[in-house]
Image (tube, rainbow, N blue to C red):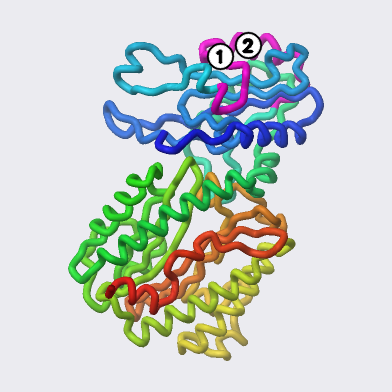
Amino acid sequence: MKYPTIDQSLFILNRKNFSKHLKNNSLAIFNSSDEFPRSGDQSFVFKQNPDLFYLSGIDQEQTILLLYPDCPNPLYREVLFLRQTNDFIKVWEGYKYTKEQAKAASGIQAIYWLEDFDNILHSIVNYAEHIYLNTNENDRYAHEVPYRDVRFIEKMKSKYPLHHYERSAPVMRSLRAVKSDVEIELTKKASAITRDAFIRVLKFTRPGVKEYEIEAEIIHEFIRQGGTGHAYTPIIASGHNANILHYTDNNQECKDGDVILFDFGAEYANYNADMSRCIPVNGRFTPRQKEVYNAVLKVMRASVKLIKEGTIWNTYHEEVGEIMSEQLINLGLITSEDVKNQNPAYPAYKKYFMHGNSHHLGIDVHDFAGRYTPFAAGNILTVEPGIYIPAESLGIRLENNILITSDGNVDLMADIPLEAEEIEDIMNS
């Protein structure tokens, strides 16, 4: 791990809060993520199951967490199972948790090796009435690959068919959306690293540079500051590429007169930043580019004011759509008549702003939260309006990360250059 150990009090509290939501005499099991093959003898870089990390702080493959608050044997009310290291693993893979290190990281006292899981589970599972199992219920996920959680559900139901099975995901959805002070600080750190990478890019970019050269500058700064890497595949989209919403080829030359749309963020201690900015390749926006840029900026600032406790997701996006429609009319892209006659299912502004304006942010970039749950203090949301004009080879998107508090919003990226003039000044300094 590149990051300092997180205070175990975070994970102790998370487990306590999770256990409060369980039915009486319930047992819950969480598995680490799969290790996916990358080639004949390599795996992709491991990324921990966010729910297991949230409850344990353990950032290692082949880990199982068992929670049974009402277990008749108090030794097994919180149990962590780890992959046991050996001399071969030490030589080829290096660091793995010892039992003492796992206790220090998680606050769990009962630590066993993975080979003990089946025996310990079988010794207590028949005293439990309910078994809570986990799956990925993120709205943005479509199940295609039979990942570890799905395989484990099949195994458990085959072995213990008469228990009452419950879903852990609804509990995790309610808990993970509201961030603790520790989580907020980790997100701030990811945002600070992202800020420094962006300023580095402002000073580096010039006509003729390749998009992937800019990407290299970004990852350099992320790793230099102890970030795990990219929170998601970065978008470095110059000119017409900015009209491809998920453009990740990053292989084109940045040309004089074009604008580059950036969408990138650092991952730090499994928490993520998510930022979008647009800059002129030559250091100066044209009048038209700046006009569109400032229109997006107006929508962004108005959107931030709408995000507060009690706001309903759909209502919020409808209000943002009205604000965007006004700006598009001012830009001459749509008319008042277009808005008057629009199909409510596909408003006129969608031609130039076709994605959502916000999503929750946390351990997942598109974090696990209720789509129909009102916004609450402790939520962190992105605000990311955009205007995309293929006919002008121009796409502008601006995005900051906003924390809702009982006293109002806090922009976690308030110190990242945003005004068009500020960006120009840094690029020409």
Which residue lies at the image location 30% right of the left edge and 17% below the top edge? Answer: 91
Location of residue 278 by image quarter? bottom left
Q: Is residue 382 left or right of residue 85?
A: right
Which residue lies at the image location 27% right of the left edge and 59% below the top edge? Answer: 214
Q: Residues within 10 Å of mark 1 (few under 14, many from 20)?
A: some
Extent of the magenta region: 103-131
Q: To which residue does mark 1 refer? A: 112
Q: To which residue does mark 2 refer? A: 120
Q: What type of secondary structure mainly makes up the magenta span?
A: helix
The amino acid type of the residue labelled 2 equals Ile
The secondary structure type at the circle numbered 2 is helix
Vertical side of 293 occupied by 125: above or below: above
Q: Are marks 2 and 1 in contact (CB under 8 Å)?
A: yes
Vertical side of 117 occupied by 249: above or below: below
Which residue lies at the image location 46% right of the left edge and 36% below the top edge? Answer: 4
Q: Is residue 2 magenta?
A: no
- The x, y position of residue 7, in whole percent, is 57, 34
Q: CA distance from mark 2 to mark 1?
A: 9 Å
First of labels 2, 1 by sequence position: 1
Which residue lies at the image location 73% right of the left edge and 14% below the top edge? Answer: 74
Location of residue 41 by image quarter? top left
The answer, for residue 349, to whether it is visible in the render is: yes
Q: Is residue 315 left or right of residue 225?
A: right
- The x, y position of residue 228, in whole percent, is 40, 42
The secondary structure type at the circle numbered 1 is strand
The amino acid type of the residue labelled 1 equals Tyr
Q: Is residue 114 magenta?
A: yes
Numbered badge on residue 307: none
